[in-house]
Image (cartoon, rainbow, N blue to C red):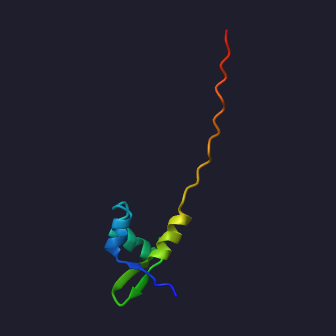
Amino acid sequence: MSISVYLTLEEVVERYRNQVSEGTLRNWRSKRIGPSYIKIGRAILYPTEELERWDRSNLVSCRRMSIAPFDKTED
């Protein structure tokens, strides 16, 4: 049986290095967007597994560039 780990609102802000504010998370909750959360009474908790899922869904994939060999021709 796995044990779920939950983060508080402040811990989520810290996890994202203050690039997502408490106000943004509050706004997202009201619009039902952003990471999933659990509400117990007045407490808002974010399961880390849901944050990781949300991270993966927002991952931007980049193509790898193939580097052509330098063609050195003499004049």
Looking at this view, name the residue that lies furthest to the top: 75
List x then y, in percent, for residue 3: 46, 84
Above or below, comparing residue 29 to residue 40 in the picture: above
* Residue 20 against residue 9 in the figure, above or below: above
Q: Residue, x 56% and y 65% (percent of image)?
A: 57
Q: Is residue 17 visible?
A: yes
- Where is residue 44? Give x, y as percent: 37, 81
For the question of whether residue 35 can be seen, the reply is: no
Foreground pick, 33 / 65: 65
Vertical comparison of 2 with 67: above or below:
below
Q: Residue at x 62, y 47 (%)?
A: 63
Instruction: Determine which quarter of the picture holds residue 59.
Output: bottom right
Residue drawn 67% across and 9% down? 75
Residue furthest to the front = 1
| Outermost bottom residue | 41
Which residue is pictured at 35% across the width and 67% down the height? 13
Q: Is residue 47 left or right of residue 41?
A: right
Q: Position of residue 70 (x, y in %)?
A: 64, 26
Indicate the quadrant where residue 30 lies. bottom left
Count all numbered tags in the image, as a single digit: 0
**Would residue 9 appear left or right of 70 to someone viewing this image?**
left
